[in-house]
Image (tube, rainbow, N blue to C red):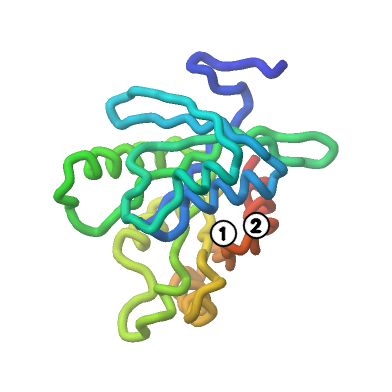
Amino acid sequence: MRDRQPGGRLSGMKRCTVVGRPNVGKTLLVLSLAEHLKARTVDVTFMDPSGAKQVRTYTVSAAIRELVGPRPHQTRCLQSIVVEVPAGKGRKVVELVDTTGLVDHIHEDLQIRRAMAQTLQAIRPAQIIVHVVDASTAGRDGSGPPAGAIDRQIADFAGSRGGYFIVANKMDLPDAARGLARLQRMFSGCAVLPVSAAERTGLREVKRHVLRSL
């Protein structure tokens, strides 16, 4: 049995925090990655901004049905799962932390503002930061930048430290290839990985980049 630290975390476990704007596919990426790592069920820990904690067990498919949806800010607190990643002849443990989407403006909903503050607090201690951007949206409008101010701020803060990379998600949608090229130019100093969490493509490269920081 693995040793646990105070608070229930496994000793030696690293935290991978997944961040980005609303509706870029953060939750689906986390669950699809867990499925790619052969998880069939997941224990999802919901940590409310107030500090309240609840754990629910799902099959991966049931978690996707319940936790993924088109509504902005469907994720309103930290949602984490612990997975094992194959590493050489052994396995390493990583906590995947899904977060509330960040926006450029002050949100009118107090609950969402608190959840976004919780997201910002979760970025600082993370050993690995996965920054998710919607590639299809990035390719749709050529007149403006492919990513907003909050994306640039995330990249400026996290890009200077190790364990950071960008996922250009929704590569299965129209305009995504153009969006990927624009994002790679904009964030030329960072790894930008083409992924479709919905189609389960690109996850091997995501796993490889996570492993680099474990």
185 and 22: which one is in front? 22
Q: What is the quadrant of residue 114 in the picture?
A: top left
Residue 61 position (above or below residue 71): above
Q: Amino acid at mark 2?
A: Leu
Disc 2 to disc 1: CB gap under 8 Å: yes
Residue 35 percent across, percent down from the top left? 65, 46
Quadrant of the image containing the N terminus: top right
Quarter location, residue 49: top left
Residue at x 37% of width, y 85% of height: 142
Question: Which residue type does callout 1 highlight?
Answer: Ala
Circle 1: element type: loop
Mark seen at residue 78: none
From the viewer's perspective, tell me whether residue 69 is left or right of residue 95: left
What x and y, as percent, mark residue 87?
76, 41
Disc number placed over residue 203 in the picture, else none: 2
Question: Would you say residue 140 is visible in this rendering?
Answer: yes
Label 2: how many Cα within 10 Å (few below 14, some 14–19, many 20+): many
Q: Residue at x 67, y 39 (%)?
A: 40
* Residue 22: image location, x then y, percent: 35, 56
Q: Please tell me which residue lies in front, 165 or 61.
A: 61
Marks 2 and 1, how far apart at CA:
8 Å
Q: What residue is drawn where x is 63% and y is 60%?
A: 200
Q: Residue furthest right?
A: 89
Identify the secondary structure beneath mark 2: helix
Q: Measuring 18% from the left and 51% from the top, which residue is drawn there? A: 107
**Mark number, residue 197:** 1
Disc on the earlier residue, 2 or 1: 1
